[in-house]
């Protein structure tokens, strides 16, 4: 099917756009602002999956939908988190660094965690997950494009600065198209589960936003740093979630496991945009 080729290529371009907006200095912030970066990385890699898991222990969803929620929770922050962080008054430099670092780390973390979640939520019905194969696939469609984008900007900085907005716009369009196609492909399943899945995803989003800014405050980080970490936790890379679901299912087209990520690609903006302004009013200046 065309989607089997278009989806990974689209994700690769989206990740290229992420790298295209980076400089090597963004990774250097790990040394200049280590506490904020470490907090953000731990909250994204550890806290987001833990919150999702605990929520699924309380709210019952069909096994395939629950597995899909966990796949989403294992993904890094979305590329639009940088834009939303700026809009909400968060620390943009920290947002860029966290998105880059966690996106690269996900090549190692996601395959292992997905294999565990498959056995936990699907039991004997879980597809066989080849951790190495998933890791290699993710490296090819995420890490490599990010590195190519980073090197392209470094080699041709002047050109990159001129076309960066165009590249970002194209990436955003591709993101919207992927979400729409994923929902349309599984429309009956989407409609059958939206009543239960939608509220769960929105609740997850709200909890992550609040948890991010509260933990940052407890650790003595600034208000803008807390807002940044909050947004990074609440805005997931839904496109990667859809792609990982396809890799795990090992089937043509977009599988049912992708429905939560596709739906979250819509609901995360409904919750995050007003949510970050509320959090900004409470914590933003502290």
Image (tube, helix red, strand yellow):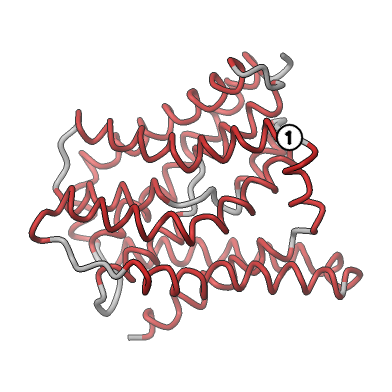
Q: Position of residue 64 (x, y in %)?
A: 18, 54
Q: Position of residue 238 (x, y in %)?
A: 44, 55
Q: Quick one: SS at disc 1?
A: loop
| Quadrant occupied by the C terminus | top right
Quarter of the figure that contains the N terminus:
bottom left
Identity of the residue drawn at 29% across and 34% down:
199
Q: Is residue 216 above or below residue 155?
A: above
Label 1, residues with CA under 10 Å away: few <14, some 14-19, many ≥20: some
- Could you say which is closer to the camera, residue 165 or residue 5? 5
Q: How many marks?
A: 1
> Does residue 155 sit above or below 32 in this rendering?
below
Q: Pick whichever, 31 or 230, lies toward us.
A: 31
Q: Which residue is at the far left?
A: 124
- Return the residue at label 1: 91
Image check: 272 left or right of 130?
right
Q: Position of residue 257 (x, y in %)?
A: 26, 59
Q: Nearer the viewer, residue 11 or 122?
A: 122
User: Which of the 4 quarters of the picture holds residue 130?
Assistant: bottom left
Q: Residue at x 37, y 74 (%)?
A: 133
Query: Residue at point 59% right, 32% down?
Result: 39
Q: Determine whether, in the image, residue 91 is placed left or right of residue 172.
A: right
Position of 39 with respect to 197 (left or right) is right
Task: Say if 17 sits above or below 1 in the image.
Answer: above
x, y percent for residue 265 = 44, 51
Q: Find residue 111 and report its image quarter.
A: bottom left
């Amino acid at each position: 099917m065309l989607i089997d080729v278009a989806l990974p290529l689209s994700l690769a371009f989206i990740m290229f756009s992420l790298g295209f907006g980076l400089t090597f200095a963004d990774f250097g912030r790990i040394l200049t602002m280590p506490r904020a970066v470490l907090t953000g990385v731990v909250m994204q890699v550890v806290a987001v999956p833990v919150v999702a898991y605990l929520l699924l222990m309380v709210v019952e969803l069909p096994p395939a939908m629950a597995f899909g929620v966990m796949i989403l929770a294992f993904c890094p922050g979305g590329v639009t988190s940088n834009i939303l962080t700026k809009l909400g008054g968060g620390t943009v430099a920290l947002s860029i660094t966290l998105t880059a670092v966690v996106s690269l780390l996900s090549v190692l973390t996601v395959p292992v965690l997905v294999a565990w979640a498959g056995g936990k939520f699907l039991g004997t019905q879980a597809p066989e997950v080849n951790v190495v194969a998933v890791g290699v696939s993710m490296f090819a469609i995420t890490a490599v494009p990010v590195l190519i984008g980073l090197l392209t900007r470094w080699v041709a900085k002047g050109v990159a600065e001129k076309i960066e907005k165009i590249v970002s716009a194209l990436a955003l369009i591709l993101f919207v198209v992927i979400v729409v196609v994923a929902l349309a492909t599984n429309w009956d399943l989407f409609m059958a589960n939206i009543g239960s899945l939608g509220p769960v995803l929105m609740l997850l989003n709200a909890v992550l936003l609040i948890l991010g800014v509260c933990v940052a405050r407890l650790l003595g980080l600034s208000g803008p740093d807390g807002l940044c970490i909050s947004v990074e936790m609440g805005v997931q890379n839904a496109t990667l979630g859809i792609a990982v679901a396809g890799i795990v299912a090992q089937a043509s087209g977009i599988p049912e496991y992708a429905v939560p990520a596709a739906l979250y690609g819509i609901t995360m903006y409904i919750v995050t945009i007003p949510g970050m302004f509320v959090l900004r009013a409470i914590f933003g200046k502290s």
